[in-house]
Image: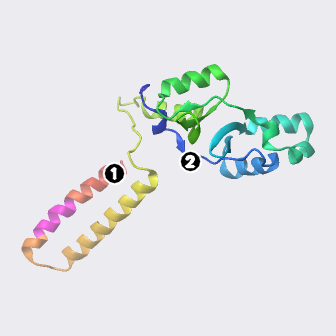
Amino acid sequence: MRDIQVSRIMTENPATVSPGASADMVRQQLESGGLHHLPVVDAGRVVGIVSSADLMKLYLLSGAAALRAATVAQIMVKDPVVIEAGSTMRQAAEMLAAGGFHALPVVDSGILLVGIITSSDLITALLRNIPVGDGSIVQRPADSLAAVIEKNRRLEDVVDAAKRYINGGQAEREHSVLVRALAALEGAERKLSL
């Protein structure tokens, strides 16, 4: 597990912000997106990172007026620690543990932003690979949730069409072939729902 590349668990194409954006706009973006960190990007290059903690410090130390007046460039962490997409989870964990921060912009060729990885991403990946009570390991599905949902919808459409065909009293030979195929699909459907 420690050799899994960061690119497999990072958030690809993360939300970003420009250095000239207002701190208040960033606050709204973080809140609406349920985010805690935003890479600051200028011409595709990572120039900083801003977090909800940075905004909270500004608000607590200087008040709401300062939050409305500040720009991202004034409050961001400049030249943040970044990680290459080909680095391992172990390397990311070591960097996060040693750095006292909770997010790493993921870059390709040392400069261009391709993702972000957070301590939460690492914990989630760890949990997916720790054996559960029966000793089995819960693995991350190869497909995204949206792809799995779409496959299940298509499978349901096939099952429904097969049931209509069977109930329509078609020729005996095709009927028996379809009954076997339907049974196999329903078995696969049960496995997907587990």
> What is the quadrant of the N terminus in the image?
top left
Considering only vertical position in the picture, is 92 above or below 162? above
Q: Earlier in the sequence, mark 1 or mark 2?
A: 2
- In the picture, the disc for residue 13 is 2
Q: Position of residue 70 (x, y in %)?
A: 86, 43
Name which residue type carries label 1: Leu
> On the rendered structure, is 155 left or right of 144?
left
Count the numbered circles shown.
2
Q: Closest to the observer: 73 or 169?
A: 73
Residue type, numbered disc 2:
Asn
Q: Point out which mark residue 28 bears.
A: none
Which span of residues is magenta-colored? Answer: 176-183
Badge 2 crowding class, 10 Å Cα cut-off, few under 14, some 14 to 19, many 20 or more, is: few
69 and 193: which one is in front? 69
Q: Mark 1 = which residue?
A: 192
Residue drawn at x 21%, y 76% as measured from the top left: 165
Answer whether labels 1 and 2 touch (C-beta < 8 Å). Answer: no
Q: Is residue 100 left or right of residue 177?
A: right
Q: Residue at x 20, y 60 (%)?
A: 183
* Alpha carbon separation for disc pair 1 and 2: 29 Å
For mark 2, give the secondary structure: loop
Dot 1 lies on which element? helix
Residue 81, image x and y in percent?
64, 28
